[in-house]
Amino acid sequence: MYEDLKKVIEESDNIVFFGGAGVSTESGIPDFRSVDGLYNQKYKFPPETILSHSFFMTKTRDFYDFYRDKMICTSAKPNKAHLALAELEKQGKLRAVVTQNIDGLHQMAGSKTVYELHGSVLRNYCMKCRKFYGIEAITESRDIPKCTCGGTIKPDVVLYEEGLDDDVVSGALRAIASADVIIIGGTSLNVYPAAGFLNYFRGSKIVLLNKSETGFDSKADIVIRDPIGKVLGECVGV
């Protein structure tokens, strides 16, 4: 299967990568839906509830206690999957990364065209005056982070009950619709509307790299169950 993937990569200069939490687990960032994922751990409130717009607005202090503890990992570094994708873009083979992750590791690895469907923990803004802040505004505050104007600072991430950014969505859909090859990695394809983006793919080859089975497996030309960093690292040579 590795040789098949290498051949697909060699023969294409119009690849799009669509990824989820499994891309960053090898960097030490936990995923959500696996056995050891956040959604299977016990908290005062369910993680899905904590990470909702209404919870953020009504229980902001509890939101930030969880968010700082579980959603931010400043020590995480790009793994071979991130580095391989950045290298493919540098070679002119990869046109875009479409990610459900909010960790910023693709950009840290060197990727330039990244559509972050769910935003980024690295960006934060004041809900009152819209001033932007880096991640330090969150990590260095012990309570609810406040802007110099007195407004509450909110992470630039898409919470449950919130819509995706229109510009990000349109850019991601254009990239997927015009790609010859799509590599899907580290995602259960259970999160919508993001998973529905794959229905826009009109190209010739679908590659699926995921440890567990997904509902998209039957449509894929290549399915590999090994860790995504190992697969892409070997196939790209990083």
Image (tube, helix red, strand yellow):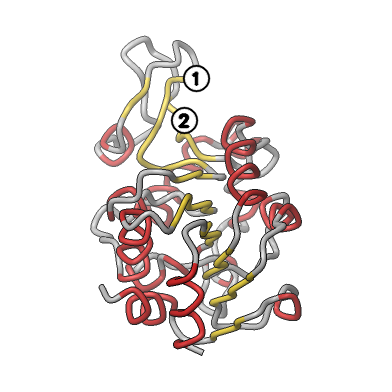
Q: Which residue is mark 1?
A: 127
Q: Residue at x 44, y 56 (%)?
A: 94
On the image, which quarter does residue 73 sit in? bottom left
Q: Position of residue 116 (x, y in %)?
A: 50, 44
Q: CA distance from mark 2 to mark 1?
A: 7 Å
> Which of the pair 60/119 is nearer the observer?
119
| Up-down relation of residue 215 to residue 29 (above or below) | below
Q: How many marks?
A: 2
Three-letter amino acid code at the position of disc 2 = Lys
Q: Position of residue 208 (x, y in %)?
A: 59, 75
Q: Residue at x 28, y 76 (%)?
A: 237
On the image, which quarter does residue 225 sit in? bottom right
> Which of the pair 114/124 is nearer the observer?
114
Q: Position of residue 7 (x, y in %)?
A: 47, 79
Image check: 192 left or right of 81?
right
| Up-down relation of residue 218 to residue 153 (above or below) | below
Looking at the rendered structure, the secondary structure element under dot 1 is loop
On the image, which quarter does residue 168 sit in? top right
Q: Residue at x 38, y 16 (%)?
A: 131
How dense is the environment of label 2, judged by Cα within 10 Å: few (below 14), some, or many (20 and up)? many
Q: Residue at x 51, y 56 (%)?
A: 14
Q: Position of residue 17 (x, y in %)?
A: 51, 60
Image check: 212 left or right of 8?
right
Q: Are marks 2 and 1 in contact (CB under 8 Å)?
A: yes
Q: Which residue is mark 2?
A: 154
Looking at the rendered structure, the secondary structure element under dot 2 is strand
How dense is the environment of label 1, judged by Cα within 10 Å: few (below 14), some, or many (20 and up)? some
Three-letter amino acid code at the position of disc 1 = Met
